[in-house]
Structure formats: structure tokens, C-alpha cells
Amino acid sequence: MIRFRHLAAMLAAAGLAACATPAATTPTAERDLSPGVAWVASSQGWADEAEAVYDEATAYVEQVAASRPEGSWAVALDIDETVLNNVEYQVRLEESGATYTPESWHAWTGEKAATLVPGAKEFLERVNALGGHIALVTNRADSEQLWTEENLAQVGLTRPDDFRILMTRAYPEGASNKMPRYAIIPAMLGAQGYPDVEVVAYVGDNVGDKPDTPGDWEFFCIDQGAMYGEPCAAVPGPGR
Ligand SMILES: [Mg+2]
């Protein structure tokens, strides 16, 4: 089942957008940022929204844990704009007039400078404390896996305490569709000594961060201000 935003919140967001102040008098650095990037980069509202989504996800897994044996369930999360915040990369692009390239993104991942999405670390810790497993499924390239793990470690997320599985995308031939990787999470955990695990929730910022067929799981959407890909947020930006 997928959670959609409340209609009233959508209408409120539309109202806010209509009242937005023209950027004519803002400083150059700010004027050059697109609204979504500026919102993620400097707005407490973005952090509050992310924490609110993780609060909902926490309440859900607490319910799950109450009715399932310890170790029998897992949560699958995307990484970029879900656990790690890469807005600094986007700010640099926009301030220099550049656009995304695989090369500049690769260099950015090598910096290992992404920060935490607010609420993510606490959520991972709560899942583990409740007896759930964490699987991270990302479309970062396999050549970026080590840097990604080092970046995660720099923000305090390490194996095995915080996550047990991290699957990247084989580059360049690997499919961006995450379904095949989602499908093998239970088998991977089974091979590691945790049989009969079900994925009960997915967390991501894009529509592809959950299975493409319905199932007995919940999806929690982090709003990334429409910076990347195909956002899952019904109203990307302020106005949750
Ligand atoms: Mg993402």
C-alpha cells in the first residue's frame, strides 16, 4: 500500500507556491539555485518533513515488530536523498551553471561528503533495536560501492549494526529497476543465517524505490524537492 499526501496539504502547498516571492532581489548564489535545491539546502522545513516521514515509518515498524518474531522482517531503503543528502553536489552544479554528468557524480561520490537525511540514522537504529534487518538498495554504480560505504561510515552508519545488505547497480549494463534486487533480499538474508525474512517496508525518494507490484508492505516517501529522477512526493517541495 502506498501512502499519499493529504489533499489539504497539497492545496496548502499550491497556495504557498502561488505566493512565492520573486527572486529579483536575492543574492546571486541564492538566485542561481532552483527552488527545490534551495529548499533542501537551507530550509528547516525540508528537515522537518524528512523527520516526519521517518517518524511515520518508525511507528509502522513498531507495529510490525509487535506481531512478528525478531529477525523475521526487513526494511529496504534507497540511499541517495533517502539516507544520504547530496544537495551540496547539486548546489555546486547550479552555482557553476553545470548539469549532471556521470563523471562529476562519480567524483562527488569519491569525496564521501554526503550528509545524513534528518531522521534516517535514528530510523535505522530503531529498526535494528526492534529486531528488523536493513537492506540498502541504490543505483549508485558498483564502482562507487566502497566510497558509499565509507561515506555511510562517516555519518555513523556501519555494518552490521546499522545495515546488513548494500546492493549497488552494475555499471553500465545493470538495470536501474530495483525489482530483481528487492526480490533477492530474503534469499541473501537466508544465506546469512536469517531464514524466512519478509520485507515489510520500503523508504525512498523516487517512484522506483518500491516494488512495481502491490504487496503486503508500506512505502514511505522522502521529499527531495524534485532534484533527481522521478520524485515520489506528490507535491515536491514545501507543503507536506
Ligand atoms: Mg534516491
Image: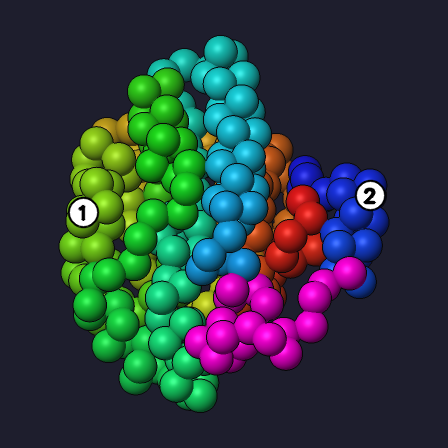
- Residue furthest out toward the top: 66
Say if disc 1 is inside 8 Å of ligand 1.
Answer: no
Q: Residue at x 32, y 20 (%)?
A: 129
Q: State the colouring used for the structure image.
A: rainbow
Note whether residue 191 is visible. no
**Quadrant into which the N terminus falls:** top right
Q: Residue at x 49, y 18 (%)?
A: 62
Q: Earlier in the sequence, mark 2 or mark 1?
A: 2
| Mark 1 Cα-neighbour bin, 10 Å: few <14, some 14–19, many ≥20 | some
Q: Is residue 87 above or below residue 159?
A: below
| Residue 69 magenta-highlighted | no
Q: Residue at x 27, y 72 (%)?
A: 108
- Which residue, given by chain and number where applicable, does mark 1 sit on? 153
In the figure, is residue 102 to the left or right of 29? left
Q: Residue at x 26, y 35 (%)?
A: 162
Residue 92 figure quarter: bottom left
Circle 2: element type: helix
In the figure, is residue 155 to the left or right of 99? left
- Closer to the camera in the image, 22 or 188: 22
Amino acid on which disc 1 is placed = Ala
| Residue 34 magenta-highlighted | yes
In the figure, is residue 101 to the left or right of 52? left
Note whether residue 115 is visible. yes
| Mark 2 Cα-neighbour bin, 10 Å: few <14, some 14–19, many ≥20 | few
| Span highlighted in magenta in the image | 19-38
**Quadrant into which the C terminus falls:** top right
- Give the CA separation, mark 2 to mark 1: 38 Å
- Which residue, given by chain and number where applicable, does mark 2 sit on? 7
